Image (cartoon, rainbow, N blue to C red):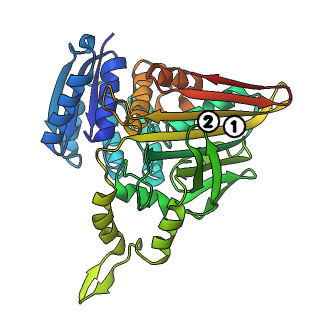
Amino acid sequence: MLYRYVVLGCGKQGTAAAYDLARFGNASSILLADSNLDAAKSALQRIQKTIPKDSRKIKFQVEQLDAQDTTKLSRLLCGANGVLSALPYYLNPPAAKASIKMKVDYCDLGGYLDSTREILKMDKAAKQAGITLIPDCGLAPGMCTSLAVCGMEHLDIAKEVKIYCGGLPQTPRPPLGYKVVYNLEGLLGIYFGKAFVLRKGKVQQVSTFTEYEQIEFPHLGIVESFVTGGGTSTCPWTFEHQLQNYEYKTLRYPGHFEKMLLLKDLGFLEDKPIQVNGGKVVPRKLFMELVGPRLAFPEDRDLVALRVQIRGTKNTHPTELTYDVLDYHDEQTGFSAMERTTGFSAAIVLSMVVHERIKPAGALPVEKCVPGRAFVEEIRKRGIKIQETIRNTASAVRRDS
């Protein structure tokens, strides 16, 4: 059976997701829609140059889209089996509502808790329409969530989950040892937004850009980590009566944390206007305008480092299961590590829903409906390697795949 897909938003992640659906989604047609028609056309050209010959029978279409025009958005979804939103987070709830109206399964990249909660409130309407809505299907939350679930599936009793994740340049450059791998405004939002964790069995809000620590990561050496927002999404509430701890930190090269903290302390990242020469200036917006182009490094290759640690018991033995992912820019397809781990992850979940490997109708968080082991199998099909290490009182075993 072949399926019709719609991808809303043709930036980097949307293009990667559409490519993945073309390769693995049993697609008969894929519609690419973006507010910028040229962006949609560029995405199509990139996909058609890259997909295998046996995928070129797929019918591709491009459309210009005003995502706030609910009538046109609904028209675009007519007859589709699945829609993937790679739109800005604040446009995801309207896209989910259109999916309910047109009875089309829906996934998005997510990452912003308020929008995710708004979509999850559509559970009753989604059930009545007989469709499934799953927000937060990108990298973090998304892939990291499913790895945590996979580890919990392996243990008899899971007690603690710790996640470390970072998109990094393969070669760090001054001044911040960082390359912008997605929207800079979004980056600052997770750096200095709200962070929710599960500690001692209770959901807690903790300050972002705190709790600095260094860890050693295979092939990278020592990297630094610190609390940021968004990565845990709904998991602290979902696992409140199952786990003791569920936490998330961002990974960066050494020195980045101290430099960003200095900028924050000096007020460069404030979002309240200040008076400058009789006019008003928002420091954060000025920072983004100045710094964004200086951190683009368009020719530099990226990588994604992800570690998920799950602790509990197996056969009555205290056991720690660790998944390490180190993915690089793919020279063959041209997709960056961030595009692969984010766009591919979302496409996997949408394909699972459309193929009825995820069956419950309704609006559901990733951790409640995406089967962890099946997700890991799909990620491995994309050439994203996962190193698995199991330590318990009896032995230590490492598997690379």
Q: Earlier in the sequence, mark 2 or mark 1?
A: 2
Residue highlighted by disc 1: 310
Identity of the residue drawn at 48% across and 19% down: 357
User: Residue 338 placed where, x, y %?
Assistant: 40, 40
User: Residue 157 placed where, x, y %?
Assistant: 77, 32
Instruction: Name the amino acid, label 2.
Output: Ala
Q: Quadrant of residue 203?
A: bottom right
Classify mark 1: residues with Cα within 10 Å, few (<14), some (14-19) or many (20+).
many
- In the image, taking residue 209 as reference, residue 343 lies left or right, namely left
User: Residue 21 placed where, x, y %?
Assistant: 33, 24
Q: Is residue 184 above or below residue 94?
A: below
Identify which residue, 227 or 329, lies in the foreground.
Answer: 329
- In the image, taking residue 230 as reference, residue 150 lies left or right, namely right
Identity of the residue drawn at 38% across and 72% down: 271
Residue 68 visible from this viewpoint: yes
- In the image, taking residue 302 as reference, residue 161 lies left or right, namely right
Residue highlighted by disc 2: 148
The quadrant of the rendering that contains the C terminus is top right
- Asked if labels 1 and 2 touch by Cβ distance under 8 angstroms, the answer is yes
Judged from the image, the secondary structure of the residue bearing numbered disc 1 is strand
User: Residue 98 placed where, x, y %?
Assistant: 29, 39
